[in-house]
Amino acid sequence: MTKVTLTVAISEDCLDDILEIAQKLRAVGMQVNQIMDTLGVVVGSSEADQVGAIAQVEGVESVESAHSYHLSPPQSHVQ
């Protein structure tokens, strides 16, 4: 499976419960790396097929996955 890095925004009306929501995120397969309670954001990673379950956790406003890209060096033949 493919691991993806996720940023999970918590609903404004659930900010007081962010630690409990983080536990629920762990229970559905997210590895929680950071909880930014003042911002209402939980950062971590999970298998790509778990993103739907993470989005369904009560109190989750949105889930965004990080996108990355790789540029070839300037002297490379492929640009």
Image (cartoon, rainbow, N blue to C red):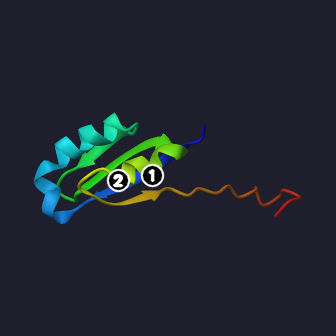
**Identity of the residue drawn at 55% across and 58% down:** 67
Label 1: how many Cα within 10 Å (few below 14, some 14–19, many 20+): few
Q: Nearer the viewer, residue 44 or 12?
A: 12
Query: Relative to 10, is 7 on the left or the right?
Result: right
Query: Relative to 51, is 43 on the left or the right?
Result: left
Return the x and y of residue 36 as percentages of the image width and height: 24, 51
Return the x and y of residue 8 as percentages of the image width and height: 34, 55
Amino acid type assigned to the residue bearing label 2 in the image: Gln
Find disc 2 in the rendering and name its residue: 56
Mark 1 → mark 2, Cα distance in angstroms: 6 Å
**Identity of the residue drawn at 27% across and 40% down:** 24
Label 2: how many Cα within 10 Å (few below 14, some 14–19, many 20+): some
Please state, as top left, top right, bottom left or bottom right, where the C terminus lies in the image.
bottom right
Return the x and y of residue 53 as percentages of the image width and height: 41, 47
Residue that sits furthest to the right in the current view: 77
Q: Which mark is residue 52?
A: 1
Return the x and y of residue 4 as percentages of the image width and height: 52, 46
Q: Of helix, strand and loop, which one carries label 2?
A: loop
Q: Of helix, strand and loop, which one carries label 1?
A: helix
- Give the mark count: 2
State the image quarter where residue 70 is shown.
bottom right
Q: Which mark is residue 13?
A: none
Contact (Cβ within 8 Å) of mark 1 with mark 2 = yes
Amino acid type assigned to the residue bearing label 1 in the image: Gly
Residue that sits furthest to the left in the current view: 16
Please state, as top left, top right, bottom left or bottom right, where the N terminus lies in the image.
top right
**Identity of the residue drawn at 32% across and 35% down:** 27
State the image quarter where residue 69 is shown.
bottom right
Q: Nearer the viewer, residue 33 or 30?
A: 30
**Identity of the residue drawn at 37% across and 38% down:** 28
